[in-house]
Image (cartoon, rainbow, N blue to C red):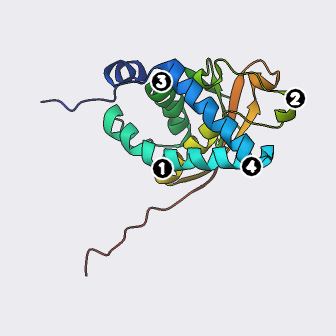
Amino acid sequence: MAPVGPRSGDAIFSSIDRVNAELFTLTYGAIVRQLLTDLEDVEEVNKQLDQMGYNIGIRLIDEFLAKSGVSRCVDFKETAEMIAKVGFKMFLGVTASVSSWDAEGTCCSIILEDNPLVDFVELPDTCQGLYYCNVLSGVIRGALEMVSMKTEVTWTRDALRGDDAYELQVKLLKQVAEEYPYKDDE
């Protein structure tokens, strides 16, 4: 039997169990609102959302690798394309594109065509410094760290802040060498 190749984001998205999109959006909104109430500082909320996303990302990568059937990416460019084309489609049902590569191939932008987290959302004037979807930057950072890539992920454009799109900048800081917990010869 021939080996099974990687599955597309659409194929995976259609075959997995999903929660109602409105329920997901409203629940996320309630979490952000509660953080704003509890922490009372927008910058601290941004940090908490990023940390929550990081914790999700370090677990989500296992499901991604198991269900997508992708093999090891050869470089950061291929990894970014896999996140945009398969990862975002698989977990959020949205399409993303990768652009604006730097000369070294270590920094790019991921642009979301749609963002289901922001349905029904309007930021009040008191929350203008809030990166409402900062959980997504944490998810990407956490997932990439689990596959030996130390990254920095920041929002460069956010439609909730008046921009024309949702754009994340992903910068590879270093490729971490894989370490094994024991030696084979012992």
Q: Which comes sooner in the sequence, label 3 or label 1?
A: 1
Query: Observer-nearest residue: 185 or 123?
Result: 123
Spatial distance from mark 4 to mark 2, Cα to Cα? Answer: 17 Å
From the viewer's perspective, is residue 30 above or below residue 42? above
Query: Observer-nearest residue: 100 or 32?
Result: 32
Mark 3: amino acid: Lys
Query: Observer-nearest residue: 128 or 109?
Result: 128
Q: What residue does disc 2 label? A: 125
Judged by depth in the image, the label closer to the viewer, 4 or 1, is 4
Count neighbours of disc 3 (C-alpha within 10 A) and say few if under 14, some if 14 to 19, many if 20 or more. many
Q: Secondary structure at mark 4?
A: helix
- Which quadrant would the N terminus be assigned to in this image? top left
Which residue: 65% across, 23% down?
Answer: 118
From the viewer's perspective, is residue 56 above or below residue 91? below
Q: Position of residue 87 (x, y in %)?
A: 47, 31
- Which quadrant would the C terminus be assigned to in this image? bottom left
Judged by depth in the image, the label closer to the viewer, 3 or 4, is 4
Query: Observer-nearest residue: 92 or 27?
Result: 27
Q: Badges 3 and 4: C-beta atoms under 8 Å apart? A: no
Which residue: 37% across, 68% down?
Answer: 180
Count neighbours of disc 1 (C-alpha within 10 A) and say few if under 14, some if 14 to 19, many if 20 or more. some
Mark 4: amino acid: Leu
Q: What residue does disc 3 label? A: 89
Q: Which comes sooner in the sequence, label 1 or label 2?
A: 1
Q: What residue does disc 4 label? A: 39
Q: Which comes sooner in the sequence, label 4 or label 2?
A: 4
Per the rendering, the mark at residue 58 is: 1
Spatial distance from mark 3 to mark 4, Cα to Cα? Answer: 32 Å
Count neighbours of disc 2 (C-alpha within 10 A) and say few if under 14, some if 14 to 19, many if 20 or more. few
Q: Secondary structure at mark 3?
A: helix
Quadrant for residue 53, please give it.
top right
Which residue: 73% across, 42% down?
Answer: 37
